[in-house]
Amino acid sequence: MHVIHNVTAREILDSRGRPTVEAVCDLADGSRGVASVPSGASTGRAEALELRDGDPSRYAGLGCRKAVASVNAALQPALRGRGFDGQQDLDAALIELDGTPNKSRLGANAILAVSLAYARAAAAQRRLPLYRHLAEMAGTGLAWLPRPTINLFSGGKHAGRQAPIQDVLVVPASARTMDEALSMTYAVYMSAAERVARKYGMRLLRADEGGQAPPFPNVESMFEDALGAIEAAGLAPGRDVVLAVDVASTHFHGSSGYDLGAETLTSRGMIERLAQWVEHYRIVSVEDGLAEEDWEHWPALCAALSPRALVLGDDFLCTQPERIRRAIQARAATALLLKVNQVGSLSEALEARDLACQAGWQVTVSARSGETEDHWLADLAVGWQGQQIKIGSITQSERLSKYNRLLQIEAETGLPLAAWPSAAGLRGGGRL
Ligand code: PGA
Ligand code: ZN
């Protein structure tokens, strides 16, 4: 039992300089948890509502004073002095106090900040590191550290739409430790920067998550430049380092189809194109290959790409249990991109994770494009046995705080990096 002495919140700024919510939870025994929430830009329609002030005279309407007031004026009096048996008990109370299906009254940003701060306080009361507390919450032991998938090049909404797709990521496939994974990625990132300078005459400009964003003439050049950068770093593409992609196709899908710049493709055409890219560039994970509401074609996408590549749903699933259930039934994906703030509480995110695991899917735990220095995401990925983690590039402190936390957890636990799906049991095996 954890008795809440107080909960408070305040506005802090995220990696884009926009306000977000930080909450503090104090328990009666003096244990304290502090946590802050991230924010997306390339958001899915089914996400829980992030409450913003809408006052154009302050942060272009993006202020979070209303969400802060949800904590200080609504949740605080309701929670003070109350005891909770665990995370689920607390989250159920938060959801009931909000009373809407998408957390639109109090705001998912307010609710999640309190949910996370409580988890930290409960871990502190139990004198456990957060990742162990989260592992117990999930009923899992500690098995591995998530293998990082790391942004190299960006287009779409995270850059200036130089290319329609959002991110090309590198996966350090042969790395056995987090330390090795990060040093390999550094070598690739630096050789990519040299290539970008030579080819596009551009100094290193970074997109929201730290990806490099030169004026690529088309999508294929993003993949080719990524493979070239891997080779130039003295590593073998397809063996040491492989590629993953976040297509984020909802954001270039319109009434006439998928707008790739020079051409517009139907859903079937898009599936064929993705299958060619997977084959040609040895891509091992394809996120949001089709638009979030293109339910009809996701099963065909899944059949075309798996088991060679993970068929990963981000905007498509929005970490929402009902959407995940429906996708499992329809055989529409093989992996869940888990973003806790898409659903708005730890317990609901855990339910999403459990559904994915029970279906034999992989779980890629993901940061948002707007992040803070808080590193609970690293603990969550380890504690909930995410096989992959997607944090962004290796260049900005809001990203590095999570990589550094993973290094710390690696030093504390000596856990190995998760194997890629072939070894982790994905139907038919993976490509590595
Ligand atoms: P977001 O996007 O955090 O800007 O929504 C990240 C992603 O699409 O994976
Ligand atoms: Zn995405």
Image (cartoon, rainbow, N blue to C red):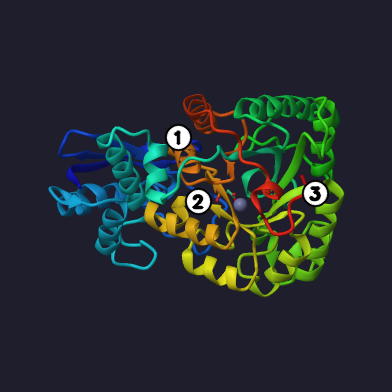
> Which structural element holds mark 3?
helix
Given the image, on which type of amino acid does mark 3 rest? Val
Residue 145, given in percent of the width and then of the height, sits at 55, 37
Residue that appears at 49% across and 26% down? 408
Q: CA distance from mark 3 to mark 1?
A: 32 Å
Residue 135, given in percent of the width and then of the height, sits at 42, 44
Q: Nearer the viewer, residue 304 or 11?
A: 304
User: Neighbour class for label 3 at 10 Å: few (<14), some, many (≥20)?
Assistant: some
**What residue did someone put label 3 on?**
219
Taking the image as shown, residue 51 lies to the left or right of residue 367, namely left
User: Neighbour class for label 2 at 10 Å: few (<14), some, many (≥20)?
Assistant: many
Given the image, on which type of amino acid does mark 1 rest? His
**What residue did someone put label 2 on?**
339
**What residue did someone put label 1 on?**
375
Residue that appears at 61% across and 36% down? 417
Q: Nearer the observer, disc 3 or disc 1?
A: 1
Q: CA distance from mark 1 to mark 2?
A: 14 Å
Q: CA distance from mark 3 to mark 2?
A: 26 Å
Residue 412, given in percent of the width and then of the height, sits at 47, 26
Asked if ligand 1 lies within 8 A of label 2, the reply is yes
> Which structural element holds mark 1?
loop
